[in-house]
Amino acid sequence: MRDVLYYSLMLLLGFAWYRFGQNLLRKGNRDENGELTKGIVGPVGFLMAGGIACYLFFGVLRALVRAEVPCIGKGCAGQLYTLAANPGEFWANVLFMVWMVLALGYALYVTLRIWFRA
């Protein structure tokens, strides 16, 4: 039951993130106060989000090739989940990393679309 709640909250958060990005894209070049519409992240945040997304994407590819993933979180630091011994925890961590890559990638996409409007 806890897993169902966790994954449904992840879907709800993803939908809210998508709607937030679409609302930013629907705005014109200027907001209601006459200021330029800002993206989700600024220039420094863009570089940081891109770096983190690339690192997590590399971690997903590494996890799929080696069939092992380090635990993500404070409570299990240094623990390694393998596909053979811990398939539930392995796929949960891989899914979380994929989810973060998609969320950061969408933030970068929305920001680039706002920056390069004609």
Image (cartoon, rainbow, N blue to C red):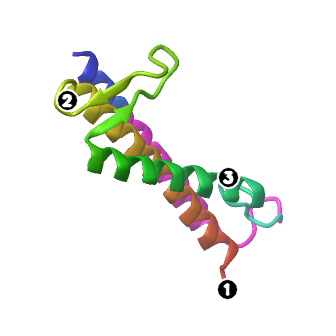
Q: Position of residue 117 (x, y in %)?
A: 66, 80
Helix, strand or loop for the magenta stretch, by majority: helix
Judge the density around disc 3: few (<14), some (14-19), many (≥20) Cα neighbours within 10 Å. some
Amino acid on which the number 1 mark rests in the picture: Ala
The stretch of residues the image draws in magenta is 10-34
Q: Earlier in the sequence, mark 2 or mark 3?
A: 3
Residue wearing tag 1: 118
Q: Is residue 3 above or below residue 61?
A: above
For the residues labelled 1 and 2, the Cα–Cα distance comes to 48 Å
- Asked whether residue 80 is drawn in magenta, I would say no
Separation of residues labelled 3 and 1 (CA atoms): 26 Å
| Residue 95 percent coordinates (x, y) | 32, 40
The crowding category of the residue bearing disc 2, from other C-alpha atoms within 10 Å (few below 14, some 14 to 19, many at least 20), is: few
Tell me where residue 102 appears, x and y as whole percent.
43, 53
Q: Residue at x 62, y 70 (%)?
A: 112
* Residue annotated with mark 2: 87
Regarding residue 99, the answer to whether it shows in the image is yes
The mark that comes first in sequence, 3 or 1, is: 3
The residue identified by callout 3 is 48
Dot 1: what SS?
Answer: loop
